[in-house]
Amino acid sequence: MKFKRLRHVKKCSGFTLIELIIVLAIISILASIAASNYQRSIWRAREAVLRNDLFTLRSSIDQYTLDKQKAPQSLEDLVTAGYIKSIPKDPMTNSTTTWVTEQEDTLIALDQMEPGIVDVHSGSSEHSTDGSAYNTW
């Protein structure tokens, strides 16, 4: 009688190989879903930083142009004049030197004396989550 009871207890403890495989499969599926969501959220955050940097640079260019009555000739002019603390890194290229500036001969204010930079874009040729290229933003 004692022998049967010990045998029964020994048989019930532990997990079967199938149970372990099923648990590992579920964990791997959940991990792959979490990893893709994490990558997508990082990409959206980089896009938000790019939009914010472009807004800041463009408004600084406009303020510089209206205050100094001439457009900046480079982004470094904005830093030396104190309109921005430093040139931000392009979040898509991770560099401060890849910003693409648009130089135009048109004047945006009546009292502006010299043309210069009127717009700035990302230097990346990649496409955003909505399908547009970053260098067209």
Image (cartoon, grey):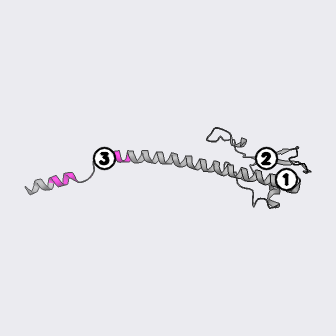
Mark toward the start of the polypeptide (1 vs 2): 1
Q: Which residue sits at x=61%, y=41%?
A: 129
Q: Quadrant of the N terminus?
A: bottom left
* Local SS, label 1: helix
- Which is more toward the observer, 37 or 12? 37
Q: Amino acid at mark 2?
A: Asp
Residue that numbered label 1 is attached to? 65
Name the residue tied to disc 2.
Answer: 119
Task: Name the foreground residue: 30 vs 49.
Answer: 49
Q: Which residues are magenta?
A: 7-24
Residue 47 falls left or right of residue 100: left
In the displayed orientation, state which residue is furthest to the front. Answer: 110
Mark 1, residues whose alpha carbon is within 10 Å: few (<14), some, or many (≥20)? many
Q: Position of residue 48 (x, y in %)?
A: 64, 50
- Residue occupying the point 85% across, 53% down: 65
Q: Quadrant of residue 131?
A: top right
